[in-house]
Image (cartoon, helix red, strand yellow):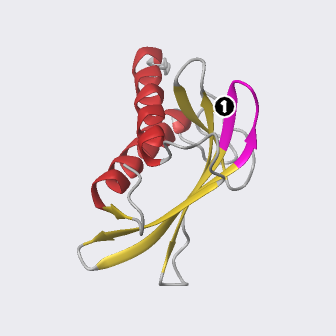
Amino acid sequence: MRKRYIPDLVKQMADCEANYLRLMRLMPDIEECNEREFEVHWQQQQSTVRLQIEERFKYTTTVVVSQSFDHSWLEVPSLVVRIYHDARAAEVICMKSRRQLRGVYSYPNTQMHQRDEKAQLNQYLGEWLSHCLTHGHEAEPVF
């Protein structure tokens, strides 16, 4: 019998807080800037990462984080991230399909989501943003 999945809320909140700090380093002028684009170079590979503000409210900002490669055959990730300025946290709310993610999925399910899909995407976002901070280049420095 499978053990019931219980989300690790402390780890998930820590991931969201770290993602907030990473996004603020990549877009320190988030209140005035609507888009930031930069190149990421790593092992002779090059891609363009775009942070595009989709909506702004008093306490939240929604940003679409996307990446494009020179290869048109490669499906690129695109994440919709909600930034909570009062809580200093940023979490993935959905992928480009625009279907909001649940915190926990039963498994198996018809969409074949992982039980902890939202937690995995928040962790992935953190790794992606860290990679951008380490290997990203922009015409004008913003860090």
On the image, the x and y values in percent for residue 100 come to 72, 39
Give the main secondary structure of the magenta stretch: strand
The quadrant holding residue 19 is: top left
Q: Which residues are magenta?
A: 54-62
Q: Quadrant of the N terminus?
A: top left
Q: Was residue 140 drawn as part of the magenta stretch in this picture?
A: no
Q: Nearer the viewer, residue 101 or 19?
A: 19
Taking the spot 58% from the left edge, 42% from the top edge, the residue there is 30
Residue 99 quadrant:
top right
Q: Return the residue nearer the eye: 126 or 107.
A: 126
Identify residue for label 1.
Answer: 102
Describe residue 18's horizontal placement relative to residue 86 as left or right.
Answer: left
Visible residue check, residue 105: no
Q: Is residue 66 above or below residue 114?
A: below
- Residue at screen point 28% across, 54% down: 134
Q: In screen coordinates, is 108 left or right of 60?
A: left
Residue at image coords 46%, 45%? 125
Secondary structure of the residue carrying numbered label 1: loop
Above-or-below relation of 112 to 14:
below
Determine if residue 108 is in view. yes
> Looking at the picture, how far across and down is residue 31, in whole percent?
63, 39
- Amino acid, disc 1: Arg
Residue closer to the observer: 115 or 127: 127
Q: Is residue 59 magenta?
A: yes
